[in-house]
Image (cartoon, helix red, strand yellow):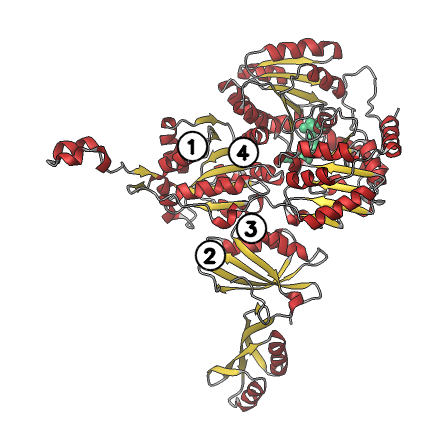
Amino acid sequence: MPGVTGTSRMISVLVEDRPAVLQRITNCLGRRGFQLQSCSIGQAATDGCLRVTLRVDVGGQPPDQVVKQLRRLVDVVEVIDLTATTPVEWETTLIKLGHDGDPSAIVREITTCRGQVVDASATTITAALSGDPLLVDAGLARLNSFQILDLARSGPVAVARHGAGQGG
Amino acid sequence: MNPSILAATDPDPAAARPAVVAAPALCGAELLLAALVREGVDTIFGIPGGANLPIYQHLPASPIRHVLVRHEQGAAHMADGYARTTGRVGVCLATSGPGALNLITGLATAHFDSVPIVALTGQVASGAIGTDAFQESDVIGSSLSVTKHSYQVLDARDLPGVVAEAFHVARSGRPGAVLIDIPKDVQQQLVADPVPERPVRLRLLARPPAPDPELVAQALAHLSASERPVILAGRGVAIAGAQTALRRLAERCQAPVGWTLLGTGVFPSSHPLALGMVGFMGTGYCNRAVTDADCLVMVGMRADDRVTCRVQDFAPRAEHIIHINIDPAELGKTVMADCQIAADARQTLEALADGVQPRRRVEWQAQVDGWRAAHPLRYPHNGQLQPQEVLAAMAAHRGPDDVTVADVGLNQIWAAVNWSGDTPGHFINSGGQGTMGFAFPAALGAQAADRGRQVFCVTGEGGFVMTMQELATAVEQRLPVRVVILNNRSLGMVRQFQDSFYGGVRSEVDLHVTPDFAMLAQAYGAFGRRVDRAEDLDAALAAACAHDGPALLDCWIDPEANVYPIVPLGGSLAEFTECPE
Ligand SMILES: Cc1ncc(C[n+]2csc(CCOP(=O)(O)OP(=O)(O)O)c2C)c(N)n1
């Protein structure tokens, strides 16, 4: 996965849906030298709250610092470091590939990597790859031999496995 | 609605009964001021401008006293000085744009030292936000990393709830700075219906966390097994009101106590177990004791680089380090304590004092006394006025309830290590940020909070000129702060660093062109006098202290006077350099 290193942590944050809340999170990380590698924000199970999934490179700092620092934010309800729990991770990627009129090889490869064709034109195919980020990586590696015109990765969302709840 | 008009025009006599008369509509500014009064605010430090004029329109009718400052940084430091010396939340007020941005240094200064202040800023009208309107600034974005939290209020009905929550956030847990940004139209918005008192978010109302009993038991076992315990205490002890518990613990287990710069006052300086200040410019005997301790307790402190010096060699012989802080993020951040207690300092120290086995430690005490004798605070006697002489003379004019506010630089360290007393809040300074220019406005804030005691401001001439425009505020408000300038005609601390650590190249530290401070004070209508000789100190201080209003003494000290002991940059605590004989 691009940018993922041995010091990456997968952090799940439950925050109140309040003004500037994402700004507060990114500021908290940036000011302390944590590198944000991916970030997704959206609905959570708790009313009035948002679930933010972060992948953060903590570098040489104690890994629990990122959790502790985020917990200091007033709008943050809970922070969980999912890294050690091998959470369920899911990511979506859109990839636009160019061809010279015959898309059959591309379509075959997309099918092999369990992707979906979501858009097509006379010279392009856009595919969606969804799943565990490692699968997305593998799929992208297979498609690498084609002409990649555009690529957008959502970054993973994650929840803890089994019954282990995340508190919303 | 005006009730008298209602009564005159309405034929129904019941309508005249007060119970059914609708409350008159209040505007956002009035709701804000009423909410501040409910929080017990009696003083606001501020300066008006386009975006906060509705608040100023209604301020005269409120019971809150306003102190008109001459620069917003001064307002923030005054609120800070008010808060550090009273324990209450200090409040400052600025307009949008440059006014709000001028608060930033003051917010950072307070926030870094866990001081509860609430800053109110005017903002351009809500419809104009984001358009680069005149005097618009993104004060929320600009202040994110120097505040605990911030609010932008877009509906006046939210004001009472936001104010209640902002004050709660500022003073609870680890206190800090909170900002409330209020667009001008929201200040003017009329609210007719009674505003529901939105409660503070329940989640934020948690009580101070009690220590985990298992960790307390662990800490007690470490302390009991220890032969050479040392306690280091920070400002958190004062915030938690844990001085008595600290003293009880120290006396019961006979552990000597050192303190951080910000912890000055949390332990009686004259106590036989007192070690003085730890760290970069701490006392030699405290640094020795920490280096030799086999068990170190750090309570209500962060352990930043000025405390630890070379962190790998901090407390190298300690088998156990017990770190107590209400903010879990401070645990395991710089010093890896093996016993980390994220809890209220008072409850934790009480549990430790109750549980610890009383012990006499004759050998350890003798060892520490030996270091105390071997490494006294020394200064040269070369015929020139020494800062220590000024401070000693000042102390003779200082009563037990009086406050000393120190600025930043050599003056700060001299004032801190030579201060004696036993009450937190009686010696304050900017520790975390080291903000030059803090002392004078902070002293004015402390004085505004309590006019019944003397407030001394010890400052260098370099720091004083950074906020000296507040002389006008001092005179106008008749705040009788006693300013003692330790004038060494240079940016002294930087000069000492250059001499000792940067090849002796004195670069841009000369301050020979500064005003005649005594005349400057007089120009503002304050008392001012210059002092050059030790024998003149007492009379000058007596005259200054007798003056009914602000007074300034410009004390021309030895320009080469340095702070000792000092740990060379990058060195360990044990490697301190002492004053040459
Ligand atoms: C606002 C600010 N700017 C710069 C510094 C860096 N600095 C630290 S001490 C010092 C010199 C202070 O000189 P002075 O106020 O005369 O006090 P002295 O050290 O001579 O007692 C400087 C420039 C600072 N701490 N704060």
Cα–Cα gap, marks 3 and 1: 27 Å
Mark nearer the N terminus (3 vs 2): 2
Q: What residue type is labelled 2?
A: Asp
Q: Name the residue under label 3.
A: A73
User: Numbered disc 2: what chain?
Assistant: A
Labelled disc at residue A17: 2
Indicate which disc residue B37 carries. Answer: 1
Which amino acid type is shown beneath numbered disc 4? Ala
Residue B336 relative to residue B445: left or right: right
Query: Helix, strand, or loop for circle 4?
Result: helix
- Identify residue for label 4: B76
Mark 3 or 4, closer to the camera: 3
Using the image, name the chain to which the residue with label 1 belongs. B
3D distance between C-alphas at marks 2 and 4:
30 Å
Give the amino acid at mark 3: Leu
Tell me which corner region of the image, top left, top right, bottom left or bottom right, holds residue A48.
Answer: bottom left
